[in-house]
Amino acid sequence: MENTLSLKAASKRKTKKELRNLGIGMAFLAPNILGFLLFTLLPVFASFLLAFCQWDIFNPAKFVGFSNFVTLFRDTLFWKYFWNTLYFMFGIPLGMAASLGLALLIKNQMKGVTLFRTIYFLPVVSSIIAVSLLWRWIYNPDFGLLNSFLKSLGFHNLPQWLSSTTWAKPAIIIMGIWQGAGYNMLLYLAALQGIPSHLYEAAEIDGASKWQQFTNVTWPLLGPTNFFIIIMGVINGFQTFAQIFVMTNGGPAGSTTTIVYYIYNNAFKWFKMGYASSMSWFLFLVMFIVTLLQWRYAGEKVTY
Amino acid sequence: MSYLDLTEIEKQRIKKRTAIINLLNKKIIPYFLMTIIGLTMIAPFIWMISTSLKESGAIFTFPPEWIPRSQIMVNYNGSKQGVFQANYKGKKTYFIRSRIFKDDATVHIIQSIGPIKKINDKLTAVSPQISPDEIVVPNKILKSYKKIFIRWKNYIEAWKAVPFGRFFLNSIIVTFTVTAGQVLTSSLAAFAFARLEFPGRDKIFLGYLGTMMIPGQVTMIPVFILLKKLGWIDTYQALILPGMFTAYGTFLLRQFFLTIPKDLEDAATIDGCSKLRIWATIIIPLSKAALATLTTFTFMFVWNDFMWPLIVTKSMKMKTLPVGLASFQGLYTTNWTLLMAASVIVLVPVLILYIFNQRYFTEGIVLSGLKG
């Protein structure tokens, strides 16, 4: 009897202590969590509900079931823009190659390497809007830097770049590589410097050539970095917006419209809030599945 | 035959050859490549600056010119004429064109060009002596007569064309508030997740993690509607509040706080220190690196952010720099000299900030890459 009493008292003390701890914990969390609830969690639920409604903001919302999603699957424009978005992701492997090349080049602490690193990184910190404007001028078919340069090399019939349905996408990819190369270069650089030098020494003793050292030592050990860069590249790639807004307005003939640009137009130009929400959920779902697949199939291979 | 059998001269020769190959492989080729790539990376920026300093007519040239130059003008018969230059009868001669045909042009010879002054933004030969007779010369020998002309006025005109001062002010206000808010609220929350024991802690943390993957496009529509209902569209609240609370910052700092040894805090707790004091006097000072990273990244992200300010601002006076620059483009679509001047204005502050704080940028990327 006495025992249970003291146990009760103890558990009472415990719950009291727990309550106190909960209070303290919540006090620390409160500023962040209130904002989080208001601007993230609640909107997520609201967006989910909206995806099943038809709403132009001005008139009351109407529940329409799955109709937005049916429309989405039949919307040929949406699928065209989905393809455009995927097309832009061809830039990811190209950009990775460029970044890795840069990292290998500046890996050895040579004199003056910091200067080059700074230069390669400049585009990364630059505002995408300013950079897009600049490249719109560079891509000017008649007097832009690129075509002038190609012309002076003796090329003729030069691409119209941003005003050509075939070349607008590659143009945006090239700009993306220029802007992003420095960022991934740093990730690769850190990874390269983390590879223990005794592995290279061992390979050299075994008579491995530089190329063999790269394919058998460097490349496999870069696995986690490659994996991280691809995942981030895909996530960012699905959200391409600003450069499209500034450089092409989605044109010519919709050839550079991305999903997010389409969502933006639907929501804030045409006030189709429900349809835009359903597209954003579709986008999230695709991103989620892609990331999951990457974790499953690539994630396993790269852990050592 | 082995190395030992070789004569001294042959040995010397081999040594020399390997030295040259080494020099080539370890110095010359890498430096060459680094320079070429460096030039390619920086060329667009130089082109931007160069264009921003040109007179608007001077950008349409082939081959492109890196140093801003303008054609000399003269007033002739009441209109402005460009001056051309060519070797004529073995002498360097200046011309103005009066008529152009397919292959030829009729020209007047300028006997003396006189002083050149800047008049109405044009380099003008003030008192040239122009012969009245016309002669015919082949068109292709005529080259524009140009002199260096740097037009700083582009910057003033761009600055005045839209309220860039106001854009700067808005960007500064928004970026500083959001960054400070984010660092403060996420370091408090991260402390709770990393160090405090309370029921439901891990479940709440999982909730945070779960939403980190949800793209901003999902939440932007409801948040926009919420702000609209509150009447906050086109206000600082709309620009600032939604950006202040992120799961990412909380996550990053929590991971860092977990690596700090607990001993110090235990001692402080025994001494009767409150949790808030532990946070302020132990955790925060020990996390300077992580905080600097978060600060740099948030700053960069918010300063360059485009979509959100685009959605919630309407009037010119509430726009941030990137949105302001985009609407400047809407007004001056192909006025390249002014557009480039405006771009330079927008880029310079961040580039300077980067060059002097490189360490945080580079360390931050590596940190986020390894932990994220």
Image (cartoon, coloured by chain):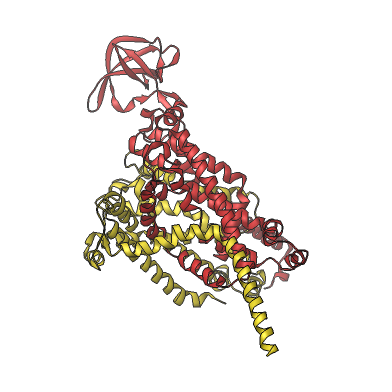
Chain colours: A yellow, B red
**Can residue A189 be spotted in the picture?**
no
Residue A270 as seen in the image, left or right of residue B94? left
Q: Which sits in the foreground, A46 or A218?
A: A46
Q: Position of residue B114 (x, y in %)?
A: 43, 11
Residue B39 as seen in the image, left or right of residue A237? right
Q: Quadrant of the C terminus of chain B?
A: bottom right
Q: Quadrant of the N terminus of chain B?
A: bottom right
The answer to which image quadrant residue B282 occupies is bottom right
The answer to which image quadrant residue A260 occupies is bottom left
Q: Position of residue A179 (x, y in %)?
A: 46, 51
Q: Residue furthest bottom?
A: A1
In the displayed structure, would residue A172 be above or below residue A195? above
The number of numbered discs placed on residues in the rendered structure image is: 0
Q: Which sits in the foreground, B172 or B344?
A: B172
Q: Which sits in the foreground, A128 or B128?
A: A128
The answer to which image quadrant residue A107 occupies is bottom right
Q: Which sits in the foreground, B136 or A107?
A: A107
Residue depicted at 38% across the width and 53% down the height: B226
In the displayed structure, would residue B109 be above or below residue A200? above
**Can residue A250 be spotted in the picture?**
yes
Q: Position of residue B120 (x, y in %)?
A: 39, 18
Q: Position of residue A252 (x, y in %)?
A: 26, 49
